[in-house]
Image: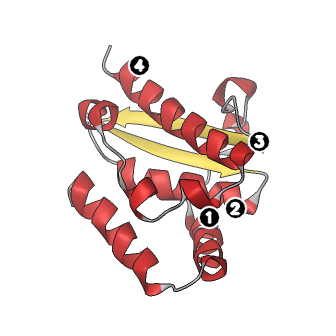
């Protein structure tokens, strides 16, 4: 599945729900299914700066592609990182660095987060792209 197809799949999923309480429940459910980071990888260097909650992300570069795992101490934040991983997992570093993650705007996510959570979302995107840049070296 291409990056664009993965984004469209999320947009289609979110269009099923009519109000934001249902969409938040869906995000929370996604958080329960994220590939969880190993406990020994929950180190300060894997914490995302700028998030109100504690969010850890690990990446593994294998066969020219990046694979992510994550965890958070807040269930909604765990769902948000799960959305990002759903789109970016298994993509090449170049694809990740150049990705226009328009699904965030298309589903209205950033508009329905508190300012601190919206800043955290941007920090998550930056961290995933930074992982891709490091893998390109």
Quote the CA–CA distance across marks 1 and 4: 26 Å
User: Along the line of sight, which residue is nearer the eye, 114 or 100?
Assistant: 114
Tag 2 residue = 76
Q: Residue at x 37, y 69 (%)?
A: 11
Q: Residue at x 38, y 28 (%)?
A: 132
Quote the CA–CA distance across marks 2 and 3: 12 Å
- Of all residues, the one furthest to the top in this rendering is 137
Mark closest to the chain's N terminus, 2 or 3? 3
Mark closest to the chain's N terminus, 4 or 3? 3
Relative image position of residue 70 (x, y in whole percent): 60, 47
Relative image position of residue 7 (x, y in whole percent): 32, 60
Q: Residues within 10 Å of mark 4 (few under 14, many from 20)?
A: few
Give the quadrant of the C terminus. Answer: top left
Q: Residue at x 76, y 41 (%)?
A: 54
Tag 1 residue = 31
Tag 4 residue = 134
Q: Residues within 10 Å of mark 1 (few under 14, many from 20)?
A: many
Can residue 57 be spotted in the picture?
Answer: yes
- Of all residues, the one furthest to the left in this rendering is 2
**Which numbered dot is residue 5?**
none
Q: Give yes or no for contact between labels 1 and 4 (Cβ–Cβ under 8 Å).
A: no
Give the quadrant of the N terminus. Answer: bottom left
Tag 3 residue = 54
Q: Residue at x 45, y 55 (%)?
A: 104
Q: Give yes or no for contact between labels 1 and 3 (Cβ–Cβ under 8 Å).
A: no
């Amino acid at each position: 599945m291409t990056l664009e197809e993965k984004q469209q799949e999320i947009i289609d999923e979110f269009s099923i729900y009519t109000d934001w309480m249902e969409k938040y429940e869906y995000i929370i459910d996604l958080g329960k299914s994220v590939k969880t980071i190993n406990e020994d990888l929950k180190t300060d260097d894997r914490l995302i700066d700028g998030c109100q909650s504690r969010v850890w992300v690990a990446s593994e570069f294998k066969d020219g592609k990046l694979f992510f795992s994550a965890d958070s101490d807040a269930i909604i934040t765990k769902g948000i990182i799960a959305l990002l991983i759903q789109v970016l997992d298994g993509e090449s570093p170049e694809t990740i660095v150049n990705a226009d993650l328009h699904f965030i705007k298309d589903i209205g996510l950033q508009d329905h987060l508190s300012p601190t959570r919206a800043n955290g979302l941007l920090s998550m995107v930056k961290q995933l792209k930074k992982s891709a840049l490091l893998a390109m070296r």
